[in-house]
Amino acid sequence: MTTLFNHFTALLALTPPPSQPGQQANPTGQMVQMIGMFAIIGVMFYFMFIRPQQKKAKEQTNLLSKLKSNDKVLTSSGLVGIVVSVKDKTVTIRSGEAKLEVLKSTIAEITEASSSES
């Protein structure tokens, strides 16, 4: 990992060689170097932020598609309950003596899937 970091810092430190008196710097070379740096930063941004978020959203969608009655679930707010019914955007759960209707998006995980199919 440290060698990757060293290579990256060396790449960032690339500067055009000092020009001789009377010589002009190569603007095309500087432009290519700048575009290359933006491309590297863009790729790093994708793999560090965008891709993991897309993967997490796909897993959440997959979890919600498997949701059915009698599943034991945990909501993002910490409520534990058993699914009574599933609607388009909401889920009705029973937690203790209370019956609650929560948004599907608040279901964090299915702790215990029901053995019977509904």
Image: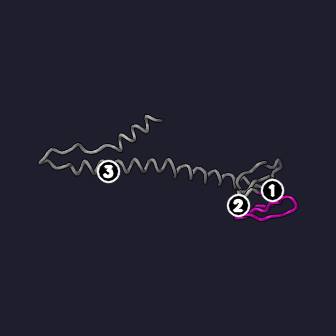
Is residue 85 left or right of 76 when viewed as pictured? right
- What residue sits 69% from the left and 55% below the top? 64
Q: Amino acid at mark 1?
A: Gly
Q: Which residue is mark 3?
A: 34
Query: Do tag 2 and tag 1 residues touch (Cβ < 8 Å)?
Result: no
Q: Hey, which quadrant is residue 16 in on the image?
A: top left
Choose between 90 and 36: the one closer to the eye: 36
Identify the secondary structure beneath mark 2. helix
Which stretch appears magenta? 79-102
Q: Which residue is mark 2?
A: 104
Query: Do tag 3 and tag 2 residues touch (Cβ < 8 Å)?
Result: no
Instruction: Work out how far the residue at label 3 is from the one at label 1, CA to CA, in angstroms.
Output: 55 Å
The image's colouring method is one colour
**Residue 107: horizontal and vertical position, in percent?**
71, 57
Query: Do tag 3 and tag 1 residues touch (Cβ < 8 Å)?
Result: no
Q: Hey, which quadrant is residue 99 in on the image?
A: bottom right
Is 118 located above or below residue 20 in the figure?
Answer: below
Q: Which mark is drawn over residue 14? A: none
Choose between 53 and 2: the one closer to the eye: 2
**Residue 101: horizontal and vertical position, in percent?**
77, 65
Q: Is residue 80 magenta?
A: yes
Is residue 6 left or right of 112 when viewed as pictured? left
- What residue sits 79% from the left and 48% below the top? 112
Is residue 30 left or right of 77 when viewed as pictured? left
- What residue sits 80% from the left and 57% below the top? 83
Sequence-first disc among 3 and 2 = 3
Q: Residues within 10 Å of mark 1 (few under 14, many from 20)?
A: many
Q: Amino acid at mark 3?
A: Met
Q: Which residue is mark 1?
A: 81
Sequence-first disc among 2 and 1 = 1
